Amino acid sequence: MKLSIITINWNNREGLRMTLDNVLSQTARDQFEYVVVDGGADDGSGEMLRQEYDGRLDKWTSQPIKPIYKKMNMGVQMATGDYCLFLNSGDSLNDPDVMKDVLPHLDGEKDLVIGSIVEGENRTVVPEPITGLWMYKASIPHSGAFIKRELLIRHPYDESLMIVSDWKFFFQALILDNASYKMIDRDIAWFDRTGISSTRPLLVEEERRKVLDELLPPRVTVDYLQFTKGQGYQNTEYDRFYIKMRKYKYGRVLYSLNVLTMRFLALFRKGARFARDFNPFSQQ
């Protein structure tokens, strides 16, 4: 099976240089295709590709395309591999032998092959099983996921989104389409945390809600929101109190205390009913 590594770039020449040198230094360099899509910013990235890397890349382009996911879709269209891995400018493969170790796992048996990534001092490992609820609260780092190209063609990245289109893809493929996957115990990449998805959490939340409204029936969406954010249910005083508390800084702690209190009261009421029903001194 053939692999295509795809790197996209916008206005990040030095990050792009680091990623290019990292990928090109792989010990299995002759066993994968390398595709680069530069967005044509005036930072000199296009000139660098032309002058320094033209003969070392399998395919590359530099043209005025700013949207992230438009560039990613273009990379998929340019690629010819059975599997694709996105390693964007500023990211890097964990060590020179990553591809040598991973390629034997890309045998076409599974739709996705997923490894771990390193973010600073932290190692991110996707838990099993991957569920819809987990996908709402988290996501699969695309720099650690080898994806069948046919899946990317079937579910192209939503170019109307700024941040969560890759999350939308994984939700559609793994949760709605029940795509098969395989976990491997291998650090794949080092992730650059200065990207837009790491610095704009409110926009991430807003776009995820938009995606859920599009993909799921409202009665399913409201369960997700209640379970994760305390939103959606406003039919009782308890629900309104829950939602209100989540707006405060210590809402999670207050909520936990509230749950414990409510459970204690429920247990107390149950005990009181038991004592009343089985009181030997009560008159029959």
Image (spheres, grey):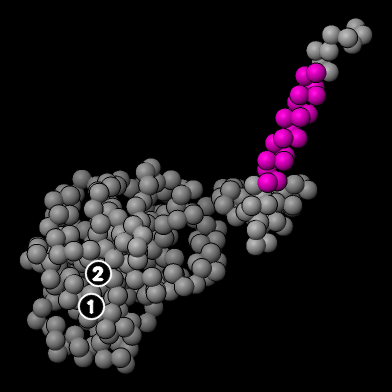
| Other-residue count near label 2 (Cα within 10 Å), few / some / many at <14 / 14–19 / ≥20 | many
Q: Where are the magenta residues, as a range? A: 257-275
In this rendering, the answer to whether 45 lies above or below 70 is: below
Amino acid identity at mark 2? Ser
The front one of 66 and 250 is: 250
Residue 25 sits in quarter = bottom left
In this rendering, the answer to whether 213 lies above or below 178 is: below
The residue tagged 2 is 92
Residues marked 1 and 2 touching at CB (< 8 Å): yes
Residue 155 position, x and y percent, is: 35, 60
SS of the residue under disc 1:
helix
Residue at horizontal 76 percent and vertical 29 percent from the top: 268
Q: Quadrant of the C terminus?
A: top right
Residue 240 position, x and y percent, is: 74, 52
Q: Give the overall secondary structure of the magenta segment.
A: helix
In this rendering, the answer to whether 30 lies above or below 127 is: below
The residue tagged 1 is 18
Q: Is residue 238 left or right of residue 221?
A: right
Residue 252 position, x and y percent, is: 62, 53
Q: What residue occupies the far top of the structure in this picture?
A: 284
Residue at horizontal 21 percent and vertical 58 percent from the top: 83
Q: What residue occupies the far front of the structure in this picture?
A: 121
Amino acid identity at mark 1? Met
Q: Quadrant of the N terminus?
A: bottom left
Residue at horizontal 25 percent and vertical 69 percent from the top: 92
Q: Which mark is residue 33?
A: none
Q: How many marks?
A: 2
SS of the residue under disc 2:
strand
Q: Is residue 20 left or right of residue 174?
A: left
